[in-house]
Image: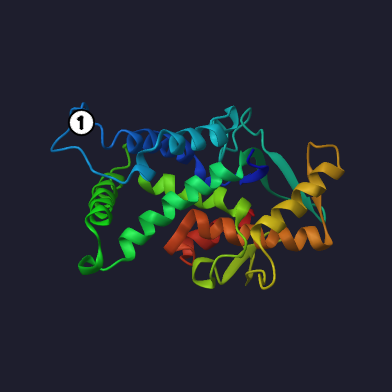
């Protein structure tokens, strides 16, 4: 039986509705090759890896909980996240969910296949990989419409966040912000992102969860090693949520809430 791990999901203000759209995309992805679906053009011919029922089931099992409707909201009655505190200052809350390593591996491998399709030169792509590229191009066009129910971009974001629970090494610096705002003190200050050498997101997740277990289970108090782990995790989450926009002004300003 595959090992079960706990996953920290940030109560990030830019994740409102993201999980729901990711779940809708997972449904659309599973049916992409179905010839009985009425659509414009022929069915897709995606690799079995992307249309497997296990892929959709894995995502649903991990995030299809009531807290997904609260994530990112700060309105009264919807703040169910676990509060995080350091030195008298409250930071962005978190949710805790569970997943098997097999589920997380299925999801991250699917994302890696998509990345491979996009980064492989057209002259070097096999037909199956070329089909994936065309599928992604079509969904990138759909993502440009804010009223779409399903979103490839949001699916990617959720998989990146969940994948941190098993990540053996931090993201490359190009995928992490160079600097983040900190809410410590009386005003926000832009500071270098926490150093990640010799660490891993999975280990940092374990440290923060250990602090949760050591308390009453309703809040997390951080200092010392746990605070440093939290700072590294926020840099990873920031990169997962914003991707190539991680160092844009608007994205960095949002990091004040971490």
Judge whether 108 appears above or below 190 on screen. Answer: above
Number of numbered labels in the structure image: 1
**Label 1, residues with CA under 10 Å away: few <14, some 14-19, many ≥20:** few
Q: Residue furthest left?
A: 41
Q: Label 1: which residue?
A: 35
- Which quadrant: the N terminus? top right
Position of 46 with respect to 90 (left or right) is: left
Q: Residue 3, relative to residue 36: is it above or below?
A: below
At 33% from the left edge and 35% from the top edge, which residue is drawn?
28
Query: What percent of the width, then of the height, locates residue 176?
Result: 54, 66
The location of residue 257, given as percent across then percent down, is: 62, 53
Q: Is residue 175 visible?
A: yes
Residue drawn 79% across the image and 58% down it: 226
Residue 158 seen in the current view: no
Specify the quadrant of the image occupied by residue 51: top left
Name the side, left or right, on which 229 lies relative to 238: right
The residue positioned 22% from the left and 28% from the top of the image is 37
Horizontal and vertical percent for residue 73? Answer: 56, 37
Q: Position of residue 109 (x, y in %)?
A: 46, 52
Q: Quadrant of residue 150?
A: top left
Of all residues shown, which one is farthest toward the front? Answer: 1
Look at the numbered disc 1 and give the secondary structure of its residue. loop
- Residue shown at 46%/65% (left/top)? 248
């Amino acid at each position: 039986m595959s090992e079960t791990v706990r996953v920290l999901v940030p109560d990030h203000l830019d994740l409102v509705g993201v999980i729901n759209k990711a779940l809708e995309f997972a449904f659309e992805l599973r049916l992409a090759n179905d010839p009985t679906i009425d659509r414009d053009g022929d069915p897709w011919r995606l690799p079995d890896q992307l249309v497997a029922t296990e892929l959709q089931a894995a995502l649903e099992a991990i995030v299809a909980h009531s807290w997904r409707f609260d994530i990112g909201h700060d309105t009264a009655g919807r703040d169910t996240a676990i509060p995080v505190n350091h030195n008298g200052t409250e930071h962005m809350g978190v949710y805790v969910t569970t997943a098997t390593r097999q589920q997380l591996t299925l999801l991250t491998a699917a994302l890696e296949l998509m990345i491979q399709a996009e980064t492989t030169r057209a002259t070097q792509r096999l037909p199956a990989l070329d089909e994936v590229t065309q599928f992604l191009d079509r969904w990138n066009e759909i993502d440009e419409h804010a009223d779409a129910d399903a979103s490839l971009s949001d699916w990617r974001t959720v998989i990146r966040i969940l994948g941190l629970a098993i990540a053996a090494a931090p993201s490359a610096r190009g995928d992490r912000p160079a600097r983040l705002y900190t809410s410590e003190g009386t005003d926000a200050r832009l500071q270098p992102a926490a150093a990640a050498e010799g660490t891993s997101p999975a280990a940092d997740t374990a440290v923060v969860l250990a602090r949760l277990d050591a308390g009453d289970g309703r809040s997390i108090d951080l200092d010392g090693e746990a605070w440093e782990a939290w700072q590294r995790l926020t840099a990873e989450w920031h990169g997962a949520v914003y991707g190539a926009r991680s160092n844009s002004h608007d994205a960095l300003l949002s990091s004040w809430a971490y």
